[in-house]
Image (tube, rainbow, N blue to C red):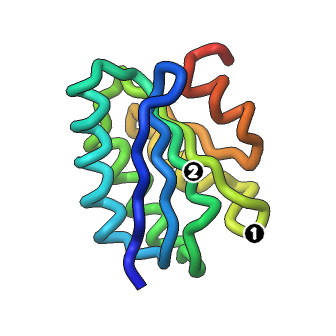
Amino acid sequence: MSIDVDMRIQDGYLLVTVTGRHDLDIEKGLFGRVVGECVSNRLNGILFDVRGLEGDIPLVDRYAFGEYLGSQQPHTLRMAFLANDAQFWSDKFMETVAVNRGAQVKTTTDPEEARTWVLGRD
């Protein structure tokens, strides 16, 4: 199964809805496209809705993606990852790895908290 992506500008940020089976390499490739879309539309925020993403995300993948975000993300860009309860890890490991590398990232299960973060109203 592949990953399906829907990107749309919504209320001053880019909403990226991701569905399908977890695949770290595909997700890294997607990130570059998403950042390019933000830059071309002069947006400073991305809300990734990954509630439709299937499959277990191993600890090593969470580390690798957090590290990738920290190294690839323009540091003026705010990103939130909206997950469902089954996907959410209370240790926020990916978020911690990314933030420790200078990224502005938040992980949450609350859609309003994600929007507030992306818009810089936290």
- Residue 17's disc is none
User: What type is the residue that disc 2 sits on?
Assistant: Asp
Image position, residue 48 (x, y; %): 51, 47
Q: Residue at x 50, y 29 (%)?
A: 10
x and y, in percent, of residue 54 in the image: 58, 76
Looking at the image, which residue is at 68% across and 66% down? 87
Name the residue type under label 1.
Ala
Evaluate if marks 2 and 1 touch, with contact meaning CB atoms under 8 Å apart. Answer: no
Rendered residue at 78%/61% (across/down): 85
Image location of residue 93, percent across then percent down = 59, 55
Which is nearer the eye, 19 or 118? 19
Above or below, 74 against 34 in this view is: above
Residue identifier under label 1? 86
Q: Would you call the spot at circle 1 few (<14 residues within 10 Å), some (14-19), or many (20 or more)?
A: few
Alpha carbon of mark 2 to alpha carbon of mark 1: how far? 14 Å
Check the image and name the residue furthest to the bottom. 1
Between discs 2 and 1, the one toward the N terminus: 2
Residue closest to the far top: 121
Instruction: Give the labeled residue for mark 2.
Output: 49
Q: Quadrant of the N terminus?
A: bottom left
Q: Quadrant of residue 34?
A: top left
Q: Position of residue 122 (x, y in %)?
A: 68, 18
Q: Is residue 117 left or right of residue 73?
A: right
Q: Residue at x 43, y 31 (%)?
A: 9
- The local secondary structure at tag 2 comes to strand
